[in-house]
């Protein structure tokens, strides 16, 4: 086990220290200083001796007022939470993974909106924060995400640290002063003109922290800021926190390190208990891709691929209202059988829906056929324009909804197995197994990149970088601040993936094992029969329309 933390060698039989390529056996020295390795106890077994955050504060910097939030298909992560955090205090947010700590931070930073209740930060109160409120919030609240070095994007450390102050509209002199102040605070002023991607991991972490501190937040959220750092870098981050605390900054520290919480925090907010969630344990969550979830989830992936692709391609041939009605009825039946719900489908398709609506409006502007309904200057709204816009928008929306249903109800492995099975007839002319492997990796790779994209977008938004507001120049700069770290992340993940394949002895042509054998059942044939009936109905309606 490779680790920076001495406490993590609790069960080691032998301990080797590596420094500048020199390996030394320090088992005896460690045992003398800390007791024998087997006697060392793992941290985090008990909560630190700190007061709990109460429902009210004398001079609150942060207030959660009966706040609840739940992700789709899940029990409330935050349930009727009311707390007040004292201005100038350092509060440790403690709890197991998945207990709601990061969700609490995202709610606080207005990156997601609560289902119920209101949030107040430095006298700014909101439920669903408007753009003006989010802009004001960025001036008083900072977010240091997990692994903040992944948000670095500029050519030099100085330019990266200057990103937030520039988004605040400060003049050049004020930006330079802010940058120098932040670099001095974290102790990397000598690295100001270095390429951030050439720095060590610890130096990158400090540069990213400086980029947040340059915005001078009065409330600072730190999500595991010392994760994966060595002892020297951890102590540097802790020293920064003590300095900020002495300056009156309110700090919310998400951590699993009970020792650090005891050293740095004035109080703690514990997640995963009655403070933040329901007293009774929630039902285990079943994913929509689980066979127990719905009829659609239980279908053989080959039947789903064939049936859904047939329906999706048929949508492009729909040219009449009768055909659209048949397609809508079939899509509605499948969506209902999938039990995904309107909310989940909307979240999965809303970006596409906005684009389609814009394209539909464009069609209304350029199509002049049919009877004029409305004249505005030289432009006329016609029945032909409305018809083309409606046909275009509805049939493409059918394709998007069907695509969302199959992706949400089918695991990447099942989709890969389906395509490999269906392409098996081409084994003599195609590298079917290698194609299936690439597809499997892509299906798993893309969600990872998507999650990282969300984290980077949130982190840059917390520094005032938004592609939604500002001048065209500001929006381009905000887009670059997101695209560059994403591109760097793609390269990093691809490199890790190559190492993982090599470590697992991947070789071309070796047979790939399957978790489940594919088997068509009666329900799969019934589903394909229903798809065939829909296709026949579409063909008949086209004949009668002609």
Image (cartoon, rainbow, N blue to C red):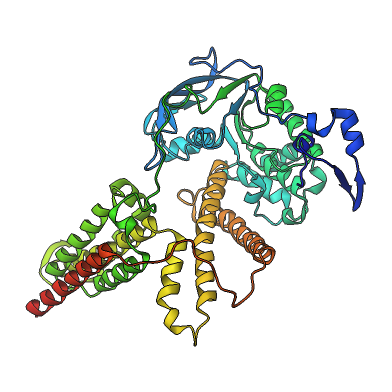
Left or right: where 243 falls relative to 372: right
Report x, y in % for residue 227.
69, 40
Report x, y in % for residue 329.
17, 60
Going 35% across and 55% down the picture, which residue do you hit? 349
Q: Is residue 203 above or below residue 333?
A: above
Q: Is residue 466 above or below residue 277?
A: below
Q: Is residue 38 above or below residue 84?
A: below
**Any part of residue 271 in sight:** yes
Residue extending furthest bottom? 429
Residue extending furthest left? 544
Going 43% across and 65% down the picture, which residue do you hit? 517
To which quarter of the image does residue 16 belong? top right
Left or right: where 463 falls relative to 406: right
Going 66% across and 66% down the picture, which residue do you hit? 498
To which quarter of the image does residue 358 belong? bottom left
The foreground one among 397 and 4 is: 4
The foreground one among 53 and 360 is: 53
């Amino acid at each position: 086990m490779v680790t920076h933390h001495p406490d993590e060698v609790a069960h080691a039989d032998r301990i080797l220290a590596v420094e500048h390529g020199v390996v030394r056996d320090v088992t005896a020295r460690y045992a003398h200083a800390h007791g024998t390795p087997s006697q060392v106890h793992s941290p985090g077994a008990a909560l630190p001796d700190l007061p709990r955050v109460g429902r009210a504060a004398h001079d609150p910097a942060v207030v959660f007022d009966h706040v609840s939030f739940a992700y789709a298909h899940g029990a409330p992560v935050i349930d009727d939470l009311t707390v007040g955090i004292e201005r100038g205090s350092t509060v440790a947010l403690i709890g197991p993974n998945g207990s709601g700590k990061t969700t609490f931070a995202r709610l606080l930073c207005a990156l997601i909106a609560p289902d119920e209740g209101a949030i107040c930060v430095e006298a700014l109160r909101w439920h669903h924060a408007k753009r003006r409120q989010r802009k004001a919030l960025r001036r008083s609240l900072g977010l240091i995400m997990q692994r903040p070095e992944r948000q670095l994007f500029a050519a030099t450390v100085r330019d990266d640290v200057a990103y937030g102050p520039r988004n605040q509209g400060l003049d050049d002199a004020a930006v330079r002063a802010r940058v120098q102040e932040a670099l001095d605070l974290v102790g990397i002023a000598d690295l100001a003109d270095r390429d951030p991607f050439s720095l060590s991991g610890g130096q990158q972490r400090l540069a990213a922290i400086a980029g947040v501190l340059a915005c001078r937040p009065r409330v600072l959220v730190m999500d595991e800021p010392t994760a994966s750092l060595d002892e020297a870098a951890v102590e540097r981050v802790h020293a920064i926190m003590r300095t900020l605390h002495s300056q009156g900054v309110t700090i919310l520290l998400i951590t699993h390190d009970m020792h650090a919480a005891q050293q740095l925090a004035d109080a703690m907010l514990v997640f995963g208990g009655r403070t933040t969630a329901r007293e009774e344990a929630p039902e285990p969550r079943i994913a929509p891709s689980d066979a127990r979830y719905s009829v659609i989830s239980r279908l053989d992936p080959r039947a789903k691929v064939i049936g859904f692709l047939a329906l999706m391609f048929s949508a492009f041939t729909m040219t009449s209202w009768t055909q659209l009605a048949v397609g809508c009825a079939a899509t509605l039946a499948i969506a209902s059988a999938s039990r995904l719900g309107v909310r989940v489908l909307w979240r999965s398709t809303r970006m596409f829906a906005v684009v389609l609506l814009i394209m539909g409006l464009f069609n209304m502007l350029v199509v002049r056929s049919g009877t004029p309904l409305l004249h505005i200057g030289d432009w006329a709204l016609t029945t032909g324009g409305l018809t083309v816009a409606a046909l275009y928008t509805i049939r493409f929306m059918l394709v998007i909804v069907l695509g969302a249903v199959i992706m949400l109800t089918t695991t990447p492995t099942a989709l890969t197995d389906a395509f490999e099975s269906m392409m098996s007839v081409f084994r003599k002319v195609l590298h079917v197994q290698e194609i299936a492997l690439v597809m499997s990796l892509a299906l798993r790779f893309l969600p990872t990149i998507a999650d990282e994209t969300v984290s980077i977008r949130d982190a840059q938004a917390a520094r005032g970088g938004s592609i939604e507001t500002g001048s065209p120049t500001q929006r381009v700069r905000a887009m670059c601040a997101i695209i560059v770290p994403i591109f760097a992340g793609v390269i990093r993940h691809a490199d890790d993936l190559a190492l993982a394949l090599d470590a697992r002895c991947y070789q071309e042509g070796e047979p790939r094992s399957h978790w489940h054998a594919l088997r068509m059942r009666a329900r799969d044939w019934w589903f394909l029969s229903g798809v065939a009936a829909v296709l026949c109905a579409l063909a008949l309606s086209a004949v009668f329309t002609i």
